Image (spheres, rainbow, N blue to C red):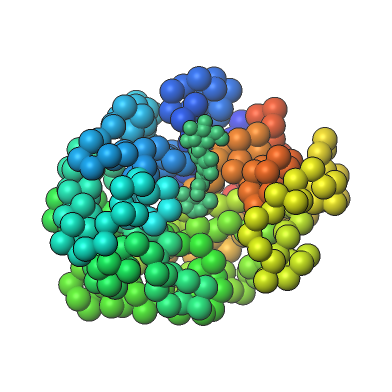
């Protein structure tokens, strides 16, 4: 079969869901080329931002479901697997939450948020990232507002609440850098603790914000096995592969996280107009290797979601340095398939 007549979702239909994170413009169907790609290539969607606390419940008990309703309708209209990102996260949280210092108020706020949001989309959102990024790099728990006020038990409480409201929905813990041994071990312990304490957890969300040479395939494989051995599904929830220099690598881990001084620095933005062929080839090879591994463990992996549709809209154009030109996805700025797209599709055509 020709690559041209294929789509990602058809190619991997017997393996795993192929998803994309979508932004507000795409939820509003104001980006016709991106929306056409979404419909043709993907069978799962995640909200890049619009289900996060600061947008959904900006003031206590004042919910704004305009965009999230549109999002769920769009997914249903296209018969997609719909993901809810995310219920409990310390970032992009409503301001008033940062002011809460007593555990009763915090527990009530969390309970009301989870109940209202999960209930609204019961039987319509198929999978919830219940808790996002609760771990530090060493695998211990992050001192987030939730942890500081409620202690580690907040995680279990969140999972139990979500399961009570929608017993059939898939529930996951989602985080980045899970292929790093220390953090992976922390997440494994967390999943075990949740299970031991009777919380329902169905899946791990490995975000997969990766680079051309990191993490190694070996660590990715170990990570797939570590979580599937716990009896939960493995999902790659925010896949992208950055090709740009990373300030931490260049200047050491101790560098302050305000990278404003690098904005406009050509050294940090080496491909402002076009990705050189040699890097395009490296990116295609990296995606080929990654998908090869995913196929090897297809019986353990239930979803692979890209964090965006095209290079035009990726968050990596503005992080960690604003205004760069990155190339992390399978479709370019003109909505065209990249070499990496073909390398991934060809894996199945040859098989
Ligand atoms: O809401 C304002 C809007 O009013 C304003 O007009 C616009 C102008 O720039 O900014 C808007 O806020 C931006 C928001 O995205 C919505 O577009 C923020 O500045 C921007 O920082 C924010 O970035 C998001 C980031 O999470 C915040 O942490 C990215 O789009 C989103 O891709 C990213 O997603 C996270 C996942 O949720 C969790 N895992 C990591 C991943 C990447 O950081």
Which residue is at 31% across, 63% downward?
Answer: 146
Residue 264's x, y, as percent? 79, 43
What residue sits 58% from the left and 56% below the top?
A: 209
Query: Is residue 257 or residue 308 the one in the foreground?
Result: 257
Q: Quick one: quadrant of the N terminus?
A: top right
Classify 327 as above or below 89: above
- Residue 87 position in % (x across, y down): 31, 51
Q: Is residue 102 visible to the viewer in this orientation of the structure? A: yes
Question: What residue is rendered at 17% in x and 49% in y?
Answer: 112
Residue 210's quadrant in the figure?
bottom right
Q: Quadrant of residue 75?
A: top left
Could you tell me residue 339's position as x and y percent?
A: 73, 43
Pick whichever, 248 or 124, lies toward us: 248
- Number of marks in the image? 0
Q: Is residue 84 visible?
A: no
Is 245 left or right of 144, judged from the image as shown? Answer: right
Q: Give the answer, above or below, for where 175 lies relative to 281.
A: below
In the rendered image, the vertical position of residue 3 relative to residue 340, given as above or below: above
Nearer the observer, 278 or 94: 94
Hey, which quadrant is residue 79 in on the image? Answer: top left
Q: Is residue 342 above or below residue 170?
A: above
User: Is 258 on the left-hand or right-hand side of 221?
Assistant: right
Quadrant of the image containing the C terminus: bottom right
Residue at left 31%, top 77%?
192
């Amino acid at each position: 079969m020709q690559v041209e007549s294929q789509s990602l979702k058809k190619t991997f239909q017997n393996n795993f869901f192929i998803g994309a994170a979508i932004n507000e413009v795409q939820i509003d169907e104001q980006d016709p080329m991106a929306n056409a790609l979404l419909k043709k290539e993907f069978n799962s969607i995640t909200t890049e931002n619009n289900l996060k606390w600061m947008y959904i419940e900006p003031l206590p008990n004042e919910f704004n479901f305009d965009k999230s309703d549109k999002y769920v309708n769009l997914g249903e209209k296209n018969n997609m697997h719909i993901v809810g990102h995310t219920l409990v996260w310390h970032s992009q949280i409503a301001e008033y939450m940062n002011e809460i210092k007593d555990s009763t108020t915090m527990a009530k706020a969390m309970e009301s948020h989870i109940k209202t949001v999960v209930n609204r989309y019961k039987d319509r959102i198929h999978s919830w990232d219940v808790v996002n990024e609760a771990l530090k790099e060493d695998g211990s728990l992050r001192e987030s507002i939730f942890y500081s006020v409620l202690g580690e038990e907040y995680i279990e409480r969140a999972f139990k609440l979500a399961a009570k409201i929608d017993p059939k929905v898939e529930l996951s813990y989602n985080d980045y850098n899970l292929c790093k041994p220390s953090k992976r071990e922390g997440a494994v312990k967390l999943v075990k603790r949740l299970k031991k304490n009777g919380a329902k957890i169905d899946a791990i969300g490995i975000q997969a914000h990766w680079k051309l040479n990191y993490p190694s395939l070996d660590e990715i494989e170990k990570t797939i096995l570590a979580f599937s051995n716990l009896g939960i599904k493995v999902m790659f929830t925010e896949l992208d592969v950055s090709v740009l220099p990373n300030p931490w690598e260049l200047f050491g881990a101790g560098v302050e996280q305000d990278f404003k001084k690098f904005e406009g620095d050509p050294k940090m933005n080496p491909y402002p107009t076009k990705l050189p062929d040699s890097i395009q080839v490296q990116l295609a090879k990296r995606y080929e290797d990654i998908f090869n591994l995913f196929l090897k463990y297809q019986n353990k992996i239930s979803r692979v979601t890209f964090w965006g549709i095209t290079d035009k809209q990726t968050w990596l154009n503005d992080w960690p340095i604003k205004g760069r030109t990155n190339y992390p996805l399978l479709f370019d700025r003109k909505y065209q398939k990249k070499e990496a797209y073909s390398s991934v599709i060809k894996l199945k055509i040859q098989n």
